[in-house]
Amino acid sequence: MAAALMLRISVRLLHRPRGVYAAGVAMASSRAMASKTAVGFVGLGNMGTPMAKNLVKHGYPVIAHDVFPEACKEFQELGTQVTDSPADVAEKADRIITMLPSNPNVIEVYTGPSGILKKVKKGSLLIDSSTIDPAVSKELAKEAEKMGAVFMDAPVSGGVGAARAGNLTFMVGGVEQEFDAAKELLTCMGSNVVYCGEVGTGQAAKICNNMLLAISMIGTAETMNLGIRLGLDPKLLAKILNMSSGRCWSSDTYNPVPGVMEGVPSGNNYQGGFGTTLMAKDLGLAQISATNTKTPVPLGSLAHQIYRIMCAKGYAQKDFSAVFQFLREEENL
């Protein structure tokens, strides 16, 4: 089923119809506000682990699964129930959150042989916080509807720090009548939960945000590098930028220059944070969307190529702010 769904999505990406996608989900009655019964969580990576922990902190029993058993050990020690497959999660919980790396992972978790949709209960609420192609979200919503469940896309912004602090921003797409039920859970993990529209619009907002983030991070790295080469102290330059018109999140909250800020990946050899591989993936999604909508994105395209080159040159597992280090090394060639 997963392979068939991937094929259908690939075809639709090439021949995507114009017009508005209709969710077509009609619930017999509006979902009541969810009580603190078990919540399934699939995907315990850098983002998923702190998100699931915040659900536990808010009193929700979590039923967890990750493809890597070692990722579940911490939750087992906390007394959290861990299952052998996403299908087992669906059998035990009627509200499930997924946080996964890419399109194939999400498709496999939902529609694979041991996927959520194999044992999903009618009336279940499925919330995907992965960053994937909007077309995939729409297809999964259709598959979920066939099983009597509701699928919503709710990608996040804010990074690992915000995930730990419970300050993520969620961009939600799906049936509007289900938004309140989703919001009750999402507010345990985030300070901003925004309804964007039909299924796929949450992903659209996230892709646009990350394209801008990549462009601004590269611009900040270039600017800081130039200032340093001109003899400016990096902390002083950052201070000036952050009180001037060039200020942005990449300069004042996540500065890419080692030693300028504490508590960010640049101060830890670019470990942790948001990986270069994931940024390259998200920029690839933006490129697909730009091509399908015939939207010119020259800076987005260039940012995509820069992060792809970084992945090929050993930066794949480093935080995306390592573009500063990449530029410094390139100048010495």
Image: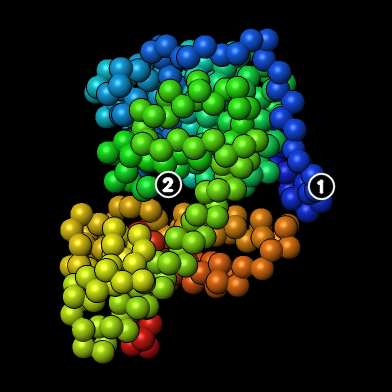
Quarter-of-image position of residue 288: bottom right
Q: Answer yes or no: do the residues labelled 1 and 2 have beta carbons within 8 Å?
A: no
Q: Give left or right: position of 48 versus 128.
A: left
Mark 2, other Cα within 10 Å: few <14 / some 14–19 / many ≥20: some
Q: Is residue 236 above or below residue 141?
A: below
Residue at x 46%, y 27% (from the top left corner): 183
Q: Is residue 315 visible?
A: no
Q: Quadrant of the N terminus?
A: top right
Q: Mark 1: give few (<14), some (14-19) or many (20+) Cα within 10 Å.
A: few
Image height of 285 relative to 85, above or below? below
Q: How many numbered marks are there? A: 2
Q: Earlier in the sequence, mark 1 or mark 2?
A: 1
Identify which amino acid the numbered label 2 is placed on: Ser
The residue tagged 2 is 157
Colour treatment of the image: rainbow
Asked whether, in this view, residue 26 is left or right of residue 223, the answer is right
13 vs 193, left or right, is: right
Instruction: Identify the residue position indicated by label 1 in the image.
Output: 17
